[in-house]
Amino acid sequence: MSTPLEKARVLYVEDEEDDVFFMRNAFRKLGVHERFHAVGDGARAISYFAGQEPYADRAQHPLPTFVLLDLNLPIRSGFEVLEWLRGQPEFKALPVVIFSSSGRLEDRQRAEQLGATEYLLKPTSGSQFFETARQLTETWLGAVRNTAD
Amino acid sequence: MLSEYFTKLQRKPPVPALVVLYLACVLPMGWLRLGPLSDHPVTIGYGLPLLICLWYPERRLLWSLMVSYALISFYKVFMDAPDFAQQAPFTIWSLQMVNMLVIGLAVNIVIELLGSLREQKKKLEQSNQELMGRETEITRQNEELQSQSAELVQQNEEIQQQAEEMQQQAEELQVQAEELHTINIESGKRQAILQALLEALQSDDARDLPERICHLLMSLLGDAASAAVILEKEGNDLVVLAHAGPVGLPTRRWAFDRSFAAIVMGHNRTACVPDLRLRPDLEGAQTTERMFRSVLATPLRIAGKTAGVVKVYSDHQHEWTSEQFKIIEWMSAQCSLLMDSRRLQTELLRANTDLDRVVKERTAELQEMVNELEHFSYTITHDLRAPLRAMHGFAGLLAEEGGPSLNEESRGYLSRITTAAGRMDRLITDALSYSRAVRHEMPKEPVDVGRLLRGMIESYPIFQEPKARIEIVGELPRVLGNEAGLTQCFSNLLGNAVKFVPAGRVPQVRITSERHGDAVRFVCEDNGIGIPKELQSRVFVMFQRLSKDYEGTGIGLALVKKVVERMGGSVGVESEPGQGSRFWIELKAAENDALSA
């Protein structure tokens, strides 16, 4: 990965505020919450990537090094976001981890077809997000061991 | 008299008779000559006995008599030497001898003649007999010929008679052949008509049909028909459905009242008017029928009701025959039949099309409904899960972060919230699985159940030692099923097997297979709490939870049953309370040698 690990960031696309809360909480516990960014729907996610207002300021809204993407989103769905990303040359290789409560095979297959990097099932409880966040940080942010102590 | 005599001469004297005759001729002669007449010269006395030989034509007798007489004469003349023979004995003897010789020779000649006569007579008689025989033969042959001739005459008469009979039969046959020919032509015509009608039925244009029937009717009736028409009653009018021949129709609509059609339909039978001029009361006579002199009409039934008439016109006065009645009735029946079948065909076609359309519409509607429902249930469960996750998560956070400041009771409440949220999540998961099992396609393929089970045991710690002891006995055969479906089934069965055990007991599960014909039964035998007999029928029913002591949604076994049935298999249970349970799944074997595989 060309991006230095210190600059690695995650963008969580999620409409459920509680889920965003639990995930942010989990990243805070892991000590990497300043690298955690979230948007509430698919349209905003696309605006974020495209650098449109209100996300034009890259200092405040830097491009993430991986995306945690819910599927069931208002306005534009997670699939649409994924499709859009894969249609942009600069985001073709961007790791996109699907994070959905849907265990449907067709959703999983469609995500794979559209070029998702990984498919994670949302845990039953918000308190179990920590485990997910820990694995994600380890894999994509490379900053667990330093901060977990 | 002479012939009688000769007839007697023919007899050949027997030898004893010859001896008797010889003695009778010699002894008296000797006695007479040498006895009483020894002194008298007897000159011709010797000749007489010789004449006997004429009666008995035997030369031996003649000559023996002559020798004997010569000896007697010699003895009298020379030995006895009587007085009268003293002078010239030799002369006397010689004269006597000459005398006797002459007679003897004469007799001899006569005898010979007689012999030849007899011979000739014999020949004559013989030839005569032959002739007689031939004549008899000829007569017999003649008679035979005559009898044969008689027979011939008789036979001749019989032949004559038979010839006459044959002639008669031939004439009859000729008549029958002619009749047959006529019938043949007629039936050929009808067959051709039927053929034509059937073809008309096949043709796409239904309006053709009555038209064709009119033409066919005319061809069937020949010269008798000048025109044919089919009329249907519509309200108070008669509408021309079809016509053939020069029917100068002023209009396609006629008044029904007082028409001949009204009479025919009213009586519902075939009727005719031999001369229309005699029926000026008929309404139709004023129009079309004025052109024609006579009419024959029969009712036409459509869909079982008398709906019109079939009419045939003739342009001259005409007595319609019963044959023609039959023909028009037959044609009308054919017409009804064809029009009915045509109508039914059309209706059926329309009904079919309608049905097809309705089915398609309904299917589309149902499909839409199913899709909506699926979307609905997906959204609902998805949306239900988010607050559940929050509830569970915040309860966890509260317990974690605010734990020390909470009392025991509050912590208990938090734990109950967590448990309830967890149960609800399982409920949603199971309900989703069930609805998926009901809805989704389940393509069947050979599944290696042994591999599937080993993989499942390896993935879940609850199926492993020391939490449980699960044993797969022997190699399990491959079956025809859906791998995802079978995974669901076995994870539910194994999950139940390790869950429903008395507290403190290590679950022990044995999985075996049995061959039942072309099916394989997998048996999952546990050491759990068992199920009472009366409840066994309910374990596979949706939302039936049989124990409050164990966590569960009441969906698991219903799901197993549904999935197995959708794969064409069956499920069942054998159990005794406290003795553990034997749950089984039966599916079709993948191969015939599955048991040994």
Image: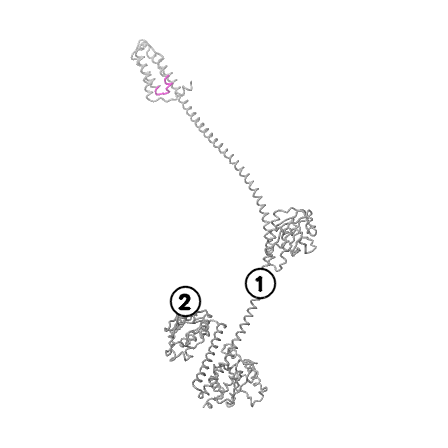
**Quadrant of the rendering where the C terminus of chain A is positioned:** bottom left
Note whether B291 is above or below A92 in the view shown. Answer: above
Along the viewing direction, whichever of B550 and A74 lies nearer the viewer? B550
Note whether A136 is above or below B312 in the view shown. Answer: below
Report if residue A37 lies within the magenta region: no
- Which chain's residue wears label 1? B
**Where in the figure is residue B563, as x and y percent of width and height?**
46, 72
Task: Name which quarter of the figure residue B71 lies in.
Answer: top left
Give the secondary structure at mark 2: loop
Magenta segment? B51-61
**Where in the figure is residue A27, as x and y percent of width and height?**
49, 87
Q: Main secondary structure of the magenta part?
A: helix
Callout 1 amino acid:
Ala
* Residue at (58% x, 46% y) in the render: B179
- Which chain's residue wears label 2? B
**N-terminal label among 1 and 2:** 1
Residue A73 located left or right of residue B37? right
Callout 2 amino acid:
Gly
Report if residue B57 lies within the magenta region: yes
Along the viewing direction, whichever of A60 and B58 lies nearer the viewer? A60
Nearer the observer: mark 1 or 2; the answer is 1
Rounded to the nearest angstrom, the CA distance separating label 1 from label 2 is 46 Å
Give the secondary structure at mark 1: helix
The disc label shown at residue B351, or none:
1
Dot 2, how many residues are within 10 Å of its Cα: few (below 14), some (14-19), or many (20+)?
few
Task: Name which quarter of the figure residue B528 lies in.
Answer: bottom left
Q: Judge whether residue B426 can be spotted in this image.
A: yes
In contact (CB < 8 Å): disc 1 and disc 2: no
Q: Which residue is mark 2?
A: B517
Q: Judge whether residue B113 can be spotted in this image.
A: no
